[in-house]
Image (cartoon, rainbow, N blue to C red):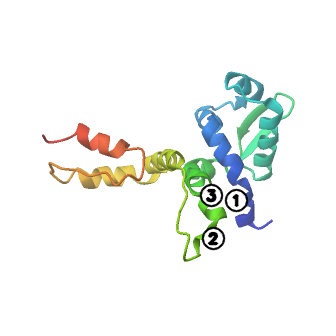
């Protein structure tokens, strides 16, 4: 299967595991995650969750020992974990706009629908890995007495700047 198609098919489960915390739990664990316990602790349906684990196994993102029901990081886990915020941003944050893209091309319809909460969560995640250190480094070189938030995230960055304010 073409790698780009595989990635596209993995989008939904990646978002689900990001939101329910399985990726974070796996990232912090060196011994894997016992799936029945994880499901019980998070009020999740075990058979449904197992189905999604199986789909992630198809993409080498997760592996599972079916005897012990322990889920482990797969060969592609590190890359997907690092970029999971982008999955959330694209699929959930702008998913409805992408599915209605043909109507957005119409002269009469220019309403772009987005999920601001998903975009903020995604931005916080990928910002932590790819952006924040550069922004902080740049902003620390400037002295300022006013700051503006463009409204493209969780407001975490502006809160940090207010915390270091020179006032």
Choose between 148 and 10: the one closer to the eye: 148
CB under 8 Å between discs 1 and 2: no
Q: Spatial distance from mark 1 to mark 3, Cα to Cα?
A: 19 Å
Mark positioned earlier in the residue sequence (1 or 3): 1
Secondary structure of the residue carrying numbered label 2: helix
Q: Locate the N terminus and report the quarter of the image it occupies.
A: bottom right
Q: Quadrant of residue 42?
A: top right
Q: Spatial distance from mark 1 to mark 2, Cα to Cα?
A: 26 Å
Q: In the rendering, which numbered label is found on residue 103?
A: 2
Choose between 82 and 166: the one closer to the eye: 166
Left or right of 142 in this view: 114: right
Left or right of 82 in this view: 72: right
Mark positioned earlier in the residue sequence (1 or 2): 1
Q: In the rendering, which numbered label is found on residue 111?
A: none
Relative vertical location of residue 37 with respect to residue 15 in this rendering, above or below: above
Nearer mark to the viewer, of 3 and 2: 2
Residue at image mark 1: 7
What residue lies at 69% left-to-right and 32% top-to-bottom?
A: 32
Residue 117: x percent and y percent? Answer: 51, 45
What residue lies at 54% left-to-right and 55% top-to-bottom?
A: 114
Nearer mark to the viewer, of 1 and 2: 2
What residue lies at 76% left-to-right and 53% top-to-bottom?
A: 59
Residue at image mark 3: 96
Relative vertical location of residue 56 with respect to residue 7 in this rendering, above or below: above
CB under 8 Å between discs 3 and 2: no
Q: In this orientation, does residue 17 appear?
A: yes
Residue 63: x percent and y percent? Answer: 77, 42
Number of other residues with Cα within 10 Å of mark 1, as a class: few under 14, some 14 to 19, many 20 or more: some
Nearer mark to the viewer, of 1 and 3: 3
List the single residue furthest toward the left: 167
């Amino acid at each position: 299967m073409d790698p780009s198609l595989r990635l596209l098919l993995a989008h939904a489960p990646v978002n689900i595991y990001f939101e329910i915390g399985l990726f974070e739990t796996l990232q912090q664990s060196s011994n894997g995650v016992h799936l029945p316990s994880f499901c019980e602790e998070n009020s999740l349906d075990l058979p449904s969750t197992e189905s999604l684990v199986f789909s992630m196994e198809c993409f080498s993102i997760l592996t599972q020992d079916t005897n012990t029901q322990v889920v482990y990081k797969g060969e592609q886990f590190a890359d997907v974990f690092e970029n999971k915020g982008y999955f959330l941003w694209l699929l959930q944050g702008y998913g409805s706009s992408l599915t209605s893209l043909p109507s957005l091309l119409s002269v009469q319809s220019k309403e772009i629908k987005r999920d601001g909460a998903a975009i903020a969560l995604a931005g916080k995640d990928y910002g932590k890995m790819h952006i924040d250190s550069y922004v902080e480094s740049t902003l620390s070189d400037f002295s300022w007495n006013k700051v503006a938030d463009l409204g493209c995230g969780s407001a975490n960055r502006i809160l940090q700047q207010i915390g270091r304010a020179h006032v």
